[in-house]
Image (cartoon, rainbow, N blue to C red):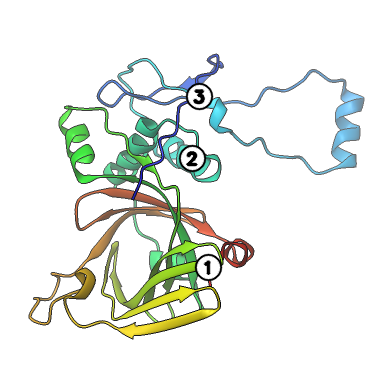
Amino acid sequence: MQALACQALAPPRPQHMCQSQQHGTGFQLPRSRPRPASSDSSRQHARQAAPRTEWKLRAADISTAAPSKAGPSQEDAIELLKIAAKEGGVPTTAVAEAMRVLEKAKVQAADWKTTLGGAASPGRSWKLIFTSGEKRVKDAAKGLAKGGGVYVPINAVQRWDASKNEIENGIYLGHVAALTFRGPFDMDGKRLAFDFNKLRVKVGPLSKEFTLKPGDFGTKKEDARKGDGPFFLFAYADDDICVARGRGGGLAMWARTPPTWNLQAGIV
């Protein structure tokens, strides 16, 4: 998979910043929304005219920060990852650091199976946004490098269906073609173990499904011991994003996709 390098935007530093430092790298999030001066009467009129619109951060509001002794908070890490998922453009080292922050925070899992797979079929779909490979994660943890990773430039989408304990992992080229793997999964706490037993190839309106034999395409071998198959160990999950470490040791972030986006992107 070709990596898509996203360049960092470095605007002038706003006030009230939260700084982080992990091996010489950090990110900044503005902590307050600038408010234009207005009279009491105009503020009262604004409240009556329309409901208040909450301020949303943009990727351009984030810049790398000077080293600081204080690390980023869990809340800042979540907010930064949501900006990266929605807009891109967030420095790759900051995205990777935010994922590590959530992993170290040991967030308590609160029915993440339903969060990931919904309460009814066909479940929920999640687009792969960002990956940081095993070597980068290990080097960053040892202080040998700044970490980083890549934004995923194609539509790689996972679908988890909690009602059926089913996973589908696919690469989609719009409505032109798709390659998907499907199979069962089992989730215990933060650990989601899975395997694939079906392969589907789609070209235009034509679709063909094949049954996979044990060991095909990296699936579990017939004589594999329990727990030897592929899995994700989730560090965080909510209704917008999720972060997990794969069996290979790398970290990844997904963003949930709505049904309308799925239809437009050919995720069917």
Q: Which mark is residue 84?
A: 2
Quadrant position of residue 200: bottom left
**231 w.r.t. 249: above or below:** below
Q: Where residue 190 sits in the image (x, y, percent)?
A: 29, 61
- The residue depicted at 29 percent of the width and 48 percent of the height is 251
* Residue drawn at point x = 49 percent, y = 21 percent: 17
Q: Residues within 10 Å of mark 1 (few under 14, many from 20)?
A: many
Q: Residue at x 42, y 30 (%)?
A: 91
Residue 173, horizontal then vertical, whole percent: 49, 61
Q: CA distance from mark 1 to mark 2?
A: 22 Å
Residue hosting label 1? 267
The amino acid pointed to by label 2 is: Ala
**Residue matched to label 3:** 9
* Marks 1,2: beta carbons within 8 A: no
Mark in front: 1 vs 2: 1
> Which is nearer the eye, 48 or 28?
28
Please tell me which of labels 3 and 1 falls first in the chain.
3
On the question of residue 100 being in view, the answer is yes
Q: Secondary structure at mark 1?
A: loop
The type of residue carrying mark 3 is: Leu
Residue 201 placement: quadrant: bottom left
> Residue 160 is drawn in which quadrant?
bottom left
Along the polypeptide, which appears first: circle 3 or circle 2?
3
Question: Residue 156 shows which numbered tag?
Answer: none
Return the x and y of residue 101 as percentages of the image width and height: 32, 39
Rounded to the nearest whole Å, what is the CA distance between mark 3 and mark 1?
A: 31 Å
SS class, disc 3: loop
10 Å crowding of disc 2: few (<14), some (14-19), many (20+): many
Amino acid tagged 1: Ile
* Residue 121 in sight from this viewpoint: no
